Image (cartoon, helix red, strand yellow):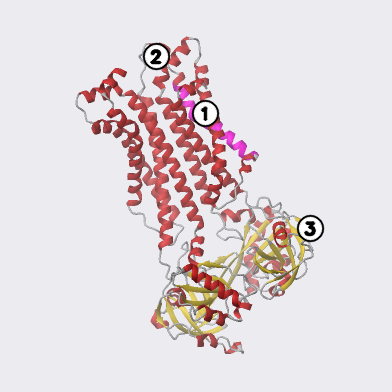
Amino acid sequence: MRNLWKHKGFSFINLAGLTVAFTCCLLMFMYIRHELSFDRFQEKGNRIVRVIMEYGFGDSEKRAGNYTSTKVMPSFKRNFPEVEEGVRMTTGSGLLKIGDQVYQDPEFLFADSTFFRVFSSFPLLAGVPDKVLQAPNQLVLTESAAKKYFPHQDAVGQTILVGAAQTPYQVTGIAKDCPANSQIRFSLLGSFSSLGASQEETYWNANYQTYLLLKNEGAIHSLQPKILPFMKKEMNDPNVFLTYHLEPYYDIHLHSPYSAYVANTDIRYIYIASGMAFLILLIACFTYINMSTARSLERAREVGIRKVAGASRKQVFGQFLGESIVIAVLALIMGIGLTGVLLPGFNGLVNRSLDFADLLQPSLIVSALAMVFCIALLAGSYPAMVLSGFQPIKVLKGRFSNSGSGQLVRQSLTIFQFAISAFLLIGSFVIYKQVQYIREKSLGFNRDHVVQLMVDNKVLEKIDVLKSALKSNPQIKHTSLAYNAPLSIVGGYGMRSAVMPEKTSLNVYANPIDDEYLKTNEIELLAGTDLTKQDLLDVNQEDEAKNYYHFILNESAARELGWTPEKAIGQRMFLDDSRPGVVKGVVKDFHFSSLHVPIQSLVLFPSTYGNLLMIKISGNQLPETISFIEKTWKSLVQHRPFSYSFMDESYNAMYQAEQQTAKVIGLFTGVAILLACVGLIGLSAFAVQQRTKEIGVRKVLGASVPGIVWMLAGHFLRLVLIAFLIAIPIGWYAANKWLADFSYRTSLEAGVFFLPAIALCVLALVAISVQTVRAALLNPVKSLRSE
């Protein structure tokens, strides 16, 4: 400790570097541990699988999704001995009325009575697991929901009115709150038998998630090959392809493209987080090694005296390694404290609720201690080996000098430090550029200034009155009722033209819309005309067999049917064979799904039903307009609380993972660069100290200040440039691999690599100049006298 205090500047640089590195690692460890722990609390999780549907018609491209029909679970239980139990789940409206109060709860799910048998690690605090969801109109509340809705009485036995129809449900059980690391999250759980669909077994109408509990962990391997032959027999139609795949429950959160009820995390981002933590630690270690070996001349006399006094090389090695351990332990302690300070901000960054108490988990304690030991060995061994190897006679006679091999090691480590920093900077730049590309890309419709309101059947009864009242405000341009907004159209349909054989069809997405959908969302019509109110009436006949549809196709759908936009107009076609009609219009392709996938075929068809009301506003007087919408809503809709969102916010939420990654990588890239620059300041200080006499002589001989600064800084800048030459090909490869996941992506022009190079060189020059400019301005008389 005395030696560390004696060399306070050196100790501070190393301690600060390791403290920051340990803080970054602890934050990353907590995040990674949380993500890897998802659903691991489920006792039977290794036997639970989620069912994924894959479907197609004829020779069209197959599609897949995590929603299934009502028949899958009971059919699999009857026909496959590997299946022990199953449960179907779907979301509820969440519209609740308790007494005179109306609530909207977004975490309302319906589930079969077998839910607590399959997911047995959701413990019940009140009620019998097999009975709480057995009958229609039964509800299980979580502990928090029970306290929220019934704060002064026992919730069990109470009645809650659910949905627009205000159907009475009885509370039959209380469950413990869902853990934060659960992909299934609910506040209220309604009995599946309450739904009319529960009485009907069909392989279509896929609106439910299905989970199966297998008899043993290995049963998935024997069950999966049986499903395709079984479904071919069930369908008995060569034109229809329908099968199912099984996803292990523990793999869903990190390895599945389909979320459950909580957004998934891509395993690649866990690898990125792990890699960044490791690279930051490496930079801190390299700084420590560089600083320690650079000071070898300064400490050479100390080593010589100790060896003359009888200290062995092993003892000297132990002393310097001990100093490394002390610094590492102090850095860990300070890092833990800094982690506690920064954790709330980090939680906001990664959208998680990590608890500081998690640091006390045995796995994290062991990891932290192992990290300290490894860092102390890695950072301390080489300097200790170098210093303990000094020959006392040469040292005390002043014949010792800093070896060329030592300088090579320091240069190599500096290059590695800045290569890592450059790689991270390039990665940050690419991710930021892609996120900006996503934000600014034209989607083919205007997502700005569109207010979204969820509606139900009771609202639909007065939808025309509501729309008319809203449009009385000059700030409201259009209103539209539809099932889906343009950026989130789901649902698979079969489409065929009148000239195609009856048994053939093409896969398309479809969305029921009204006559103002295109105007509200500013979707460009390439050919034909928009829908009219008469088109809506034509599909709302009392005799459904008389319904006749006017379709609007996107370019891709017209192209797939072999039509140009102009030739498509007036063509007869069928949607799911149950909807005959003609093509009335063709719109320009727009992105109705994530930019991760290419635009696919889409059919828009008229309907007077929907669950989403979109309101296009001018953007002027925004608070007043929202206030007007709220007032109008409350005057006409008393059974449902006013709750709105903006379409652009929904769009940004689709890319939350990319935005979080950009922020995290940007933050930790800044940390990496800071650590590398701190190390560079230390090395430049040592270089200046070693060349003080030379600087004085050069100034006496007429050298200018810029010339001396370049003499000192040029060497380090060359190392930074070499580092960038190493980082560019690696960064280019990694950027291309990451961008390959997007069907629509930013370009990788030269500026992506050269702008970070210039920025890093400027930062390095600033770091070096802290010492070099001061040395260059020093009076040469003082330089020569001090020497």
Q: Is 371 a magenta residue?
A: yes
Provide the residue span drawn in magenta. Answer: 362-386
Q: Quadrant of residue 637?
A: bottom right
User: Mark 2 = which residue?
Assistant: 395
Disc 1 on helix, strand or loop?
helix
Mark 1 lies on residue: 327
Tag 3: residue type?
Ala
Q: What is the three-letter code of the residue carrying label 1?
A: Ile
User: In the rendered structure, does residue 66 fall within the stretch colored magenta?
Assistant: no
Image check: 616 left or right of 231? left
Tell me which label, 3 or 1, sits earlier in the chain: 3
> Marks 2 and 1: in contact by CB < 8 Å?
no
- Secondary structure, mark 3, is strand
Mark 1 or 2, nearer chain start: 1
Whole-Å distance between the Cαs marked 1 and 2? 27 Å
- The outermost residue toward the top is 309
Callout 2, which amino acid?
Val
Q: Residue at (51%, 61%) from the top-left corner? A: 654
Residue at which label 3 appears: 126
